[in-house]
Image: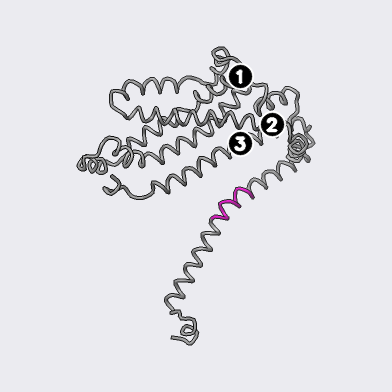
C-alpha cells in the first residue's frame, strides 16, 4: 500500500469505487442535461430557420410571420394576454380535474363486477365514438353561452382516456398477488388498496397525460364557439382581423399552458410512483 493511501486512510479498492461513483454521477448529470439541451437546441434552430425564411422569402408578414414579430406582440400586449391566459388556465384546470375524477370513478365502477362492466362499457364506447367536436354547438343550446358549457364540453371530451386506463390498470393486477390476498382473507378494500390500485397507478397516469392534452383541445374548441374571453377567443378574434402575429402569440401561450398541465401530471406521477414503488407483499395488509 502506498504512503499516500496510508496518509489518507484509503485503499486502492475504495479509491476505485469512489472514482467509479464520480464517473456515474457525471454521466447521470450529462444524461439529464442532454434531455433538456437537445429539445431546446432543436427548438432554437427551428426558430432561427423560421425567422430567416420569413425575412428572406419576401412573403407578407400577414401570411408568414417571423418569430420576432410574435415576441414583440407578446411583450407589448402582455397584460391583456395574461388576463385571457388566466381565464383559460382556470377553466381548463377545472375541466381537467372533473374529467380526471369522473374518469377514475367510472373506470373503478367498470371493474366492480362483470355485470356492471357488461352493462356500462358498451355505452362508454358509444359515447367515445361520437364526433365530439361536431357537438360543441349543442352545448350552447343545452347550457347557454358561458363557462358551464365549456366546462361540460371539456369533461365530455376528456374523461374517456382516464376511464379506460383506470379500468385496464385495475384489471392488470397479477394473479398471484390476488391469490395471496384471497389466502390471507383480505377484504375487498384491502385488495383494492394494496394490490389493484398500485398496479393501476401507471395506467391511470398514462390516461391523465392524455386527458391533459385533450382537455386543452376541448377548452380551445369551447372558447372558439362560446367565449368572449380566453386564448381561444383571442385566436378567433385575431384570425378574423388578419393579425397573424397575435394568433401565433396566443397559440404560443396555449402551448405553454398545455406543457404546464402535462408537467404537473408528470410530477404528480413521479411522486405517487415513489409512494407506491415498493413491491407488494403480505406485510402491506
Residue 270 at x, y percent in the picture: 47, 46
Give the position of the C terminus as an image quadrant: top left
Which mark sits nearer the N-terminus, 3 or 2? 2
Instruction: Say which quarter of the image contains residue 260.
Output: top right
Q: For marks 3 and 2, give the one nearer the viewer.
A: 2
Q: Secondary structure at mark 2?
A: helix
Residue sitting farthest toward the left: 183
Residue 175 at x, y percent in the picture: 26, 40
Residue under label 3, please give it. 257
Report the side of 33 relative to 233 (left or right): left
- In the picture shown, does residue 73 fall above or below 141? below
Please tell me which residue is depicted at 27% across the width and 43% down the height of the picture.
177
- Residue 34 lies in the magenta-colored region: yes
Residue under label 2, please give it. 83
First to last magenta residue range: 32-40
Residue sitting farthest toward the bottom: 3
Q: Quick check: marks 1 and 2 in contact, CB under 8 Å?
A: no
Residue under label 1, please give it. 146
Q: Secondary structure at mark 1?
A: loop
Label 1 neighbour load within 10 Å: few <14, some 14-19, many 20+: some
Q: Quick check: marks 3 and 2 in contact, CB under 8 Å?
A: no
Which mark sits nearer the N-terminus, 1 or 2? 2
**Numbered circles on residues, count:** 3
Label 2 neighbour load within 10 Å: few <14, some 14-19, many 20+: few
Amino acid at each position: 500500500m502506498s504512503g499516500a493511501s496510508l496518509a489518507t486512510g484509503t485503499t486502492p479498492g475504495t479509491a476505485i469505487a469512489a472514482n467509479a461513483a464520480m464517473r456515474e454521477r457525471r454521466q447521470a448529470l450529462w444524461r439529464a442535461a442532454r434531455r433538456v439541451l437537445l429539445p431546446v437546441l432543436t427548438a432554437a434552430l427551428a426558430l432561427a430557420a423560421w425567422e430567416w425564411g420569413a425575412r428572406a422569402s419576401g412573403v407578407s408578414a400577414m401570411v408568414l410571420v417571423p418569430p420576432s414579430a410574435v415576441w414583440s406582440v407578446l411583450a407589448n400586449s402582455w397584460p391583456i394576454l395574461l388576463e385571457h391566459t388566466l381565464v383559460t388556465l382556470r377553466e381548463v384546470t377545472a375541466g381537467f380535474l372533473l374529467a380526471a375524477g369522473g374518469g377514475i370513478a367510472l373506470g373503478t365502477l367498470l371493474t366492480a363486477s362483470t355485470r356492471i362492466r357488461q352493462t356500462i362499457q358498451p355505452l362508454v364506447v358509444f359515447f367515445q365514438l361520437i364526433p365530439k367536436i361536431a357537438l360543441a354547438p349543442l352545448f350552447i343550446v343545452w347550457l347557454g353561452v358561458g363557462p358551464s358549457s365549456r366546462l361540460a364540453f371539456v369533461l365530455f371530451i376528456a374523461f374517456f382516456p382516464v376511464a379506460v386506463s383506470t379500468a385496464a390498470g385495475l384489471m392488470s393486477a397479477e394473479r398471484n398477488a390476488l391469490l395471496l390476498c384471497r389466502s390471507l382473507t383480505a377484504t375487498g378494500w384491502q385488495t383494492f388498496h394494496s394490490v389493484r390500485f398500485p398496479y393501476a397507478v401507471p395506467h391511470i397516469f398514462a390516461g391523465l397525460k392524455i386527458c391533459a392534452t385533450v382537455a386543452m383541445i376541448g377548452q380551445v374548441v369551447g372558447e372558439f364557439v362560446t367565449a368572449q374571453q380566453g386564448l381561444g377567443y383571442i385566436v378567433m378574434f385575431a384570425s378574423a382581423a388578419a393579425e397573424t402575429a397575435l394568433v401565433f402569440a396566443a397559440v404560443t401561450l396555449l402551448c405553454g399552458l398545455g406543457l404546464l398541465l402535462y408537467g404537473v401530471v408528470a410530477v404528480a406521477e413521479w411522486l405517487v410512483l415513489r409512494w407506491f414503488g415498493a413491491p407488494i407483499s403480505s406485510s402491506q395488509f
